[in-house]
Image (cartoon, helix red, strand yellow):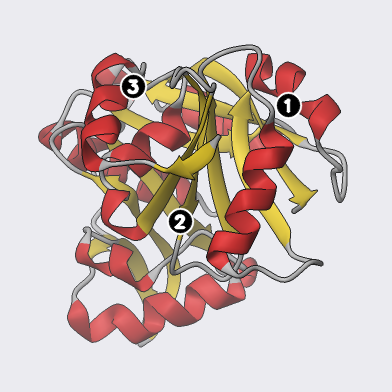
Amino acid sequence: MNRKLSQAELEALLEKIEREQHFLYYSYLTNRRHNTIHYGQFTDEGELLGVMAFLTGLSFNAFSVYPVQESFRLQPLLSFMQQELHLPNDAIGSFIVTEEEMALLAPQLEFIKPPKELLLMKHIDEEAVPPGDHRVVRLGPSDYERIESMMVELNTMAFSREELQHPFFGVMDQQDLIAVGGYHVYSADYVELGNIGTDLSKRRQGLGRHICAELTRQGRLMTPHVYLNVLKENTAAVQLYCSLGYEVICKQYIAEFAI
């Protein structure tokens, strides 16, 4: 049986889920809950086999999945959600899952292209963060249009306008924003860096490093739990984050699949 989950059921899931092993779904249960719709798959006896959530407000079909039992079967739940959410037959979905979850789910899905390895990193070493750079400034409402324009230029799919309520930092060249960074999540529970990038013509000048350092510094003032996601193939970024005191804590996959 497939059905929408109640708030009480979501609270029960939140009590037992491990944030760092189910990082994306944890965010759907917490900071992103007001924009998500959660569905569950149950046995005839009412035992929960697995859950899947849909995040509204993005330019792509963003899902998150949490298999509770190995007997969880994703395709029937996905078909149910397609009808409930009125998604077209040719719709493409996207999610991030751990290695263990990928082993369970991969045989059940048709991937649009090979999944990519994604590393969840957590900040561990505060002493590795360099001193602040005077070029990095806190951005405000007057900079929102510049930030949104740069997100488009950088093809930052996961950016949403709602994230402008979180702090953003940038480097300006006259009136032009040439480097920027912010947060996907900014709370006392945990912080997730995101929306980071540098203008193509201004790269290799260390701007990205100083932006990430400031984001990390400000994040640690909010909470000791500061995270980011980075593609494993982006070795330069991985090395940068390691140099700032981050460590890999979970190996994941980001994938697009036929709904």
Secondary-structure class at tag 1:
helix
Quarter of the image where one finds residue 173: bottom left
Q: Badge 1: few (under 14), some or many (20 or more) residues near its Cα, within 10 Å?
A: some
Q: Is residue 211 above or below residue 176?
A: above
C-alpha distance separating marks 1 and 3: 38 Å
Q: Badge 3: few (under 14), some or many (20 or more) residues near its Cα, within 10 Å?
A: some
**Residue at left 22%, top 30%?**
11
**In-front residue for pair 250/101:** 101
Quarter of the image where one finds residue 139: bottom left
Q: Position of residue 128 (x, y in %)?
A: 33, 21
Q: Is residue 87 above or below residue 19?
A: below
Q: Badge 2: few (under 14), some or many (20 or more) residues near its Cα, within 10 Å?
A: some
Q: Amino acid at mark 3?
A: Ala
Residue placed under numbered mark 3 in the picture: 128
Residue placed under numbered mark 1 in the picture: 105
Q: Is residue 218 left or right of residue 41?
A: left
- One can see residue 106 in this view: yes
**Residue at left 32%, top 38%?**
29
**Residue at left 77%, top 48%?**
257
- One can see residue 131 in this view: no
